[in-house]
Amino acid sequence: MAEPKPDPMHIILDAARRCYLREGIAATGMKEVAAEAGIARSTLYRYFPGRDDLFIATIKAEMLDVNAFIIDRLAVYTAPADQVVEGLILAINEIPRRPLLAVVFASEEGSRARRVIWQSDVIMRFGEELMDHVVRPASEAGILQDAVGPEVLVEWVYRLLLSFLTLPSNFVKTDEQLRTTLHALLVPVLLK
């Protein structure tokens, strides 16, 4: 019986991830990824029309993995306020542990990369997926702030996450301090 053929997308995304980590995001182009994947550049372009498309797809795969990790760990929290706070703490702690996400979201090199990701729909989908199990129940319960739309709330939480990743606090040093701060400052912005 023949071995199943490897998924070309999986091969390409794995090769791109290795190149980004080894060479750096800025130094990695389609040529380097095609060589790493063992395919022709023309084949790579059939799957990804450009360098940014490949980068976004690679980051999306990493972010989906982080989402699954966070959602799994949030299952023990039932209150929307706890889910938002604990989800943000999990993300702040987990993203730097993922080498590619750490480069993108928590380093100087990630500046251009963050702009590329920000201008794609990946961030909104990431936030919507992660926040859906918080925003929807809070909205249904009538406790979601309604001065702005849920998409603005998702963007605002993402911006808060980015600030903690790129510029750690001088005053909030522990998860417990962060938890207290988020309950005091973030929860009232999101929930009534």
Image (cartoon, helix red, strand yellow):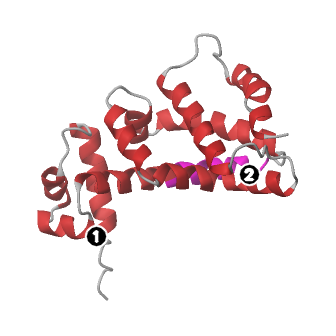
Give the mark toward the camera: 2 or 1: 2
Badge 2 amino acid: Val
**Where residue 178 appears, x then y in whole percent?**
69, 23
Mark 2 surroundings within 10 Å by alpha-carbon count, few (fewer than 14), some (14 through 19), many (20 or more): many
| Residue 139: in magenta span | no
Observer-nearest of 14 and 118 = 118
Quadrant in the picture for residue 10: bottom left
Quadrant in the picture for residue 147: top right
**Where residue 77 appears, x then y in whole percent?**
80, 46
Q: Residue at x 43, y 40 (%)?
A: 101
Specify whether 131 is left or right of 13. right
Contact flag, marks 2 and 1 (Cβ < 8 Å):
no
Q: Which residues are magenta?
A: 64-76
Q: Is residue 65 visible?
A: no
Quadrant in the picture for residue 1: bottom left
Determine which of the numbered discs, if any, sits on residue 8 in the image. 1
Specify whether 150 is left or right of 6. right
**Where residue 177 appears, x then y in whole percent?**
72, 19
Quadrant in the picture for the C terminus = top right
- Label 1: which secondary element: helix
Mark pair 2, 1: CA separation: 36 Å
**Where residue 100 appears, x then y in whole percent?**
38, 41
Specify whether 34 is left or right of 3. left
Residue 24, placed above or below residue 120: above
- State the residue position of label 2: 135
Observer-nearest of 41 and 37 = 41
Specify whether 58 is left or right of 134. left
